[in-house]
Amino acid sequence: MSSAIDRTDVLLGTAPFTHVSGLLFNNAVFANGACLVIICGLEPSDLLPAIDKYKATLMFQFPTFLQKLVRSPLLEKFDVSSIKKVYVGGSTMPSVVAEETLKDSVVDVNTGEKLGPRQIGELRIKCPSSAVGYLNNPKATANLYDEEGFLRTGDIGYYSEVGDFYVVDRIKEMFKCMDQQVAPSEIEDLLMQHNAVKEAAVTGVPHAEFGEAPRAFVVLHQGFPANEATVAELQTYVSAKMSRHKQLHGGVEFVSSIPKSDTGKNLRRDLRDSYLRRQAVRGL
């Protein structure tokens, strides 16, 4: 990271000091004598004027806030041409391409076998900035790397025929339906393309026939009715574009908001736990 920043760079300080991203990016700025511009908010109304005023060249951002930025109507009112590179981390983003690394591969989650283009598996990397291990935890450190020295990232993704890498989800967020792996973010990305959907989160819920099945929690855009007709429309929409095990057999639920972490990640477990508690009260 340090070598990617020089004295002429201006980093917009969007990475929180309490997060590893802040430690990494802000220290890299100091180490290279570059300029760090600290701002107090992450909304487009905070970011865009700062980019324009200080001619920021670099920025780190969490996917949730970055998507808000690129969709903002304010974007056309400010000059952001000074930005050379935007680093994205902390969660997944539709079609985000991973930064180039020294060596990387995608392997089957269960067997460790290396996979070919467009095959989804765990992303493993080997590069100078990889973690050495866990302090005073040799067992966790031993499990962090495979026998070839590649770091097990815990990220699910794939690479294209030209070598671009795409992150799909985290292993711990995945679940099985019909004995096949389901990445929630893949279904979320599709739902977000529907004109009625403002936000979406998907998690696995118990299903009598399939063990677990995808259930979508959806925030609708204003003007779209939260009724059975909209549920049917969204289920049909997903069914037309997804394999059977990725379809919304667990149902669709309309919510006023999606709970998120401080870094903008969807808290899918909170949604699942809330659903299970309500089912228990109903005796289901």
Image (cartoon, grey):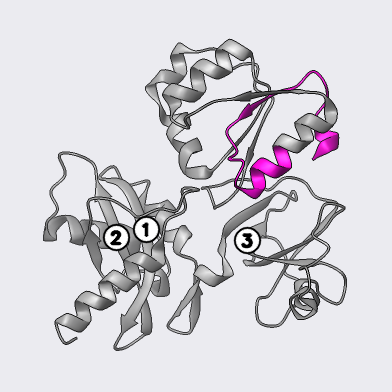
Q: Which residue is drawn at 58% across and 51% down?
A: 90
- The kind of residue on which mark 1 rests is Ala
Q: Counting residues from the N terminus, which is met first, the one under dot 3 or under dot 2?
A: 3
- Magenta region, residue range: 1-25
The reply to whether dot 1 and dot 2 touch (C-beta < 8 Å) is yes
Residue 187 in the figure: left or right of residue 206: right
Q: Is residue 118 above or below residue 83?
A: below
Find residue 272 and report its horizontal and vertical position in percent. 34, 71
Q: Quadrant of the C terminus?
A: bottom left
The residue pinned by badge 3 equals 157
Marked residue nearer the N-terminal end (1 or 2): 1
Indicate whether 279 appears above or below 95: below
The residue that label 2 is drawn on is 217
Element under disc 1: strand
What residue did someone put label 1 on?
201
Q: In which quarter of the image is residue 35?
A: top right
Report the residue at 56% width, 47% height from top: 95
**Residue 3 lies in the magenta-colored region:** yes
Callout 2: helix, strand or loop?
strand
Q: Residue 240: x percent and y percent?
A: 34, 61
How far across and down, in percent of the image, does residue 88 sit? 61, 42
- Distance in Å between CA atoms under marks 1 and 2: 5 Å
| SS for callout 3 | strand
**Horizontal side, residue 117 vs residue 206: left or right:** right
Which circle's residue, 3 or 1, is located before the other in the chain?
3
Residue at horizontal 46%, vertical 20%?
Answer: 75
Residue 240 is at least partly visible in this image: no
Label ID, residue 148: none
Specify the quadrant of the image occupied by residue 214.
bottom left
Assign the N terminus to one quadrant of the image: top right
